[in-house]
Image (cartoon, helix red, strand yellow):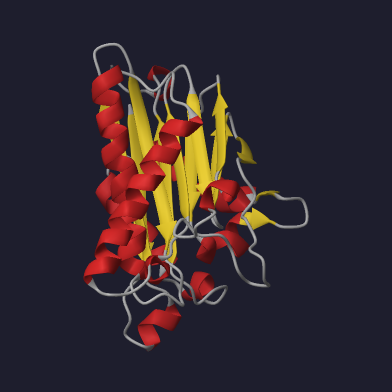
Amino acid sequence: MWQHLAHSIRGAAHEADCSPCQDSHSFRFFDGQSSSAVVACVADGAGSSKYSNEGSAFACEAIEENAAAYFEEHGCFDHLQREDVVGWCNDARQRMEEEASQRDCGIREFASTLCAAIISPSRSFFFQIGDGAIILGQQGVYGVVFWPQSGEYANSTNFLSAKQYEQHLEFLSVSSCFSDVALFTDGLERLALAFDTQTPHPPFFEPLFQALRSTDNCAALGEDLREFLQSYSVKSRSDDDKTLILASELLEKDGEDD
């Protein structure tokens, strides 16, 4: 059994100019006859792109819908390959291109990053383009899957909308599974990551995962998380939008019924 929390919060910069939050996220649990899996993704629209809030939504929607179709056909994700993920990303790009054509603009106006994780009992998969990060935890030990990508210029990154995006698309398949996973956009990097060691910052994650594992009211805890992300202590570190997904698998030893 998995419990999760997820929020996308508009940053102070977008609050000031009344622009929408450019981050998006999705989380879905798949339960089949012989396998189960969690699929989570976050996306951060480029601040310089006019419709990037829609671009990030297209990215998350495409990954979730293509993952659902794959799971329905195969019953599991055990044999997922990089080329499958590239196909999912191309579908997201096609959605952006179709909308760009209707609005008579370039796909760059829908520019977005993407971080995605698929966790199943036997195998896990991760892919990313751009900044933000995916954090994995097992028995209180945390690690970063891919370090946030930097672009060609200072304070820039890579986007799914770019022509050569495949060159920057990172993909990892591992045979082990994990009990905790977090995904977040770059608005939380300075709080969640230790840049000197390129590792997660345990004081940020440990109390969050502990609260998630011990709660029997995810709705109330979710409101607490929203208030935390909107607090001065968080906003003072970055005026960018902030998205955070936290998910923990509650095993029988955690006191949960089957």
Residue 26 visible somewhere in the drawing = no
- Residue at point 46%, 32% (across, down): 83
- Residue at point 44%, 40% (across, down): 86
Residue 121 visible somewhere in the drawing = yes
> Taking 73 as reference, is 140 left or right?
right
Outermost residue toward the right in this view: 196
Which quadrant of the rendered structure holds the N terminus? top left
Relative to 234, is 34 above or below? above
- Residue at point 33%, 67% (across, down): 53
Q: What percent of the width, then of the height, locates residue 95?
A: 28, 55
Outermost residue toward the bottom in this view: 17
Residue nearest the observer in this picture, 159 or 94: 94
Which quadrant of the rendered structure holds the C terminus? top left
Relative to 191, is 176 above or below? above
- Residue at point 37%, 23% (across, down): 255
Q: How many marks?
A: 0
For residue 117, which quarter of the picture? top left
Q: What percent of the width, then of the height, locates residue 225?
A: 38, 57
Q: What percent of the width, then of the height, locates residue 90?
A: 38, 46
Relative to 106, is 16 above or below? below
For residue 256, which quarter of the picture? top left
Residue nearest the observer in this picture, 185 or 218: 185
Residue nearest the observer in this picture, 177 or 146: 146
Q: What percent of the width, then of the height, locates residue 126?
A: 51, 37
